[in-house]
Image (tube, rainbow, N blue to C red):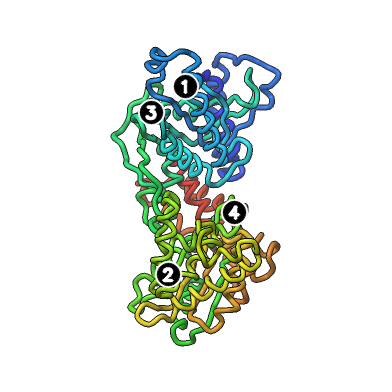
Amino acid sequence: MMTTPRVEIEAAIAALEAQRSMLGAAVVDMAVAPLQAALGTAAPAVATNGDAEAKLKQLSVMFIDVVGSTAIGSRLDPEDIHELMDPTLREFTAIVEAHHGRVLKYTGDGLLAAFGVDESREDDAENATHAGLAILGALTGESGAQLRVRVGIDTGPVLVGGGLEGVGNIRGSTVNFAARMEQHAPVGGLRISYATYRMVRGLFDAVEQPLLTIKGFAEPVRTYLIERAKPRAFRTANRGIEGVETPMIGRTSEFAQITDALRVLSTERRYQSVMIIADAGVGKSRLLYEVENWADVQADPYVICKGRAHPHTRGHPYGLLRDVVAWRFQIADSDPADVACNRLIEGMAPYFGDDESSSHLLGHLIGMDFTTSRHIAGILGDPQQVRLRAFRAGAELFKRMASAPGVGAPVVVLIEDLHWADDGTLDFLGYVAEQCADAAVIVVSSARPELLSRRGAHGGGGRGTRIELAPLDLDATDELADVLLAQFHIVPPGLRSVVTQHGQGNPFFMEELVKMLLD
């Protein structure tokens, strides 16, 4: 898909204008001025009634191409080609839609899809990458033996709608770059841009490729081949600026409050809850990360359990609880059903011995296939009975993790983005607070304020400590700015002012401003 220079310039101007409130009028005006001058000399675009409806959105754009379709077509009749290709493209479409994407165009032997067209999500790039891997793994049976696929993804600003094709029309350099990613991907491979990699770093096994020279781009570009999704046990947060180790700044008292609660677990042996409440980007995730690192290096060990909710988690009953269980017992999303079940049984065995009823009940609750278990068969038709027994099994697991001879230790449950949790998991956490009152268990969670209006003052997790994290004060903001800007040999006063004033004491905003300026 080709775009005119005018469209590219308009997209760049729109992207800068969208950041006016954050970067400030002076910075945006200075950047936009040369673009406006170039726009005046650019060839006019074809005008249509739909152009006024075009909007600039951040999308992850995916191109999929069936390799060798021309050679296959030379050996088959047109009817046979349709019989081979149509089911394949339907399957690819179903995969895209299952990952919250939308197919915008079919190209005969491939398709163009985008993630974020209808509703922007924080995990659009992650969803696109998962969809790409699923598509590569979908070619099985007779059709899979004949067809090979390449996939490419880029993430960035895209003009959506308008033009001759209406809402299905997307334009901009991101679209062109995604097409180049697909064209340069190996057969059976998924290549992503650096912009996409930045948003999924730590979630997939990625191999950086040699710098790639692409027609139409002045400088060689960084790209990555995605091999597989990482198991939950090895995921890392995608925050910060690559190459800059940023210390935790301005959170000394909050950090001490949480670690003090962890220290008394083994002596007081009582359930505790600490909930960190703050708006996006203020530092909730970083505080959890530092607490986990602290617990990892203590002489007296802790049993760590982790989970993270996502925007789509609320639509999956017990989805967050499944994430916690899967992280603890290293169960990957890609594990076959029997492998996942066996890992859960083996993981719980040190605490329950030969009694597999608890693992079967808990596994069934979170969506694993235990329907043939004799421990489940008698209550399959009674959801309330299944829920009650599974809740008991889960709470008992935490108790035994904290006290089992030889293998037990104080249990630290770290949960990120609890505001996106499903109601079933929140109910379970409330149950654990009641049943584990005399156990060395602490749940440390982070959430946005919206959780309190949804589930009350304690977020459904039982009474405990609530830490309301405020934006960084002026001294901490200046200290963080020094760290973020240290890679620049000379820092103009105007640049420092943009980072400190427009970052508004929000570490994530400040990091994103610096990354944007670097780009």
Q: Earlier in the sequence, mark 2 or mark 4?
A: 4
User: Which SS class for mark 1?
Assistant: loop
C-alpha separation, residue under disc 2 versus residue under disc 1: 47 Å
Query: Pointer 2: what residue?
Result: 348
User: Which SS class for mark 2?
Assistant: helix
Dividing the picture into quadrants, the one containing residue 26 is: top right
C-alpha separation, residue under disc 2 versus residue under disc 4: 23 Å
Between marks 2 and 1 in the image, the one whose residue lies nearer the viewer: 2
Q: Residues within 10 Å of mark 1 (few under 14, many from 20)?
A: some
Between marks 2 and 4 in the image, the one whose residue lies nearer the viewer: 2
Could you tell whether 53 is left or right of 103 in the image?
right
Numbered mark located on residue 148 in the image? 3
Amino acid type of the residue that numbered disc 2 sits on in the rendered structure: Met
Say if 513 sits above or below 373 in the image: above
C-alpha separation, residue under disc 3 versus residue under disc 2: 41 Å
Numbered mark located on residue 23 in the image? none
Could you tell whether 241 is left or right of 274 in the image?
left
CB under 8 Å between discs 3 and 2: no
Amino acid type of the residue that numbered disc 3 sits on in the rendered structure: Arg
Q: Position of residue 222 (x, y in %)?
A: 35, 36
Q: Earlier in the sequence, mark 1 or mark 4?
A: 1
C-alpha separation, residue under disc 4 versus residue under disc 3: 33 Å
CB under 8 Å between discs 4 and 3: no
Q: Position of residue 327 (x, y in %)?
A: 44, 61
Q: Quadrant of the C terminus?
A: top left
Query: Pointer 4: what residue?
Result: 316
User: Which SS class for mark 4?
Assistant: loop
Q: Position of residue 291 (x, y in %)?
A: 44, 69
Amino acid type of the residue that numbered disc 1 sits on in the rendered structure: Asp
Q: Residues within 10 Å of mark 4 (few under 14, many from 20)?
A: some
Q: Position of residue 128 (x, y in %)?
A: 49, 39
Q: Earlier in the sequence, mark 4 or mark 3?
A: 3
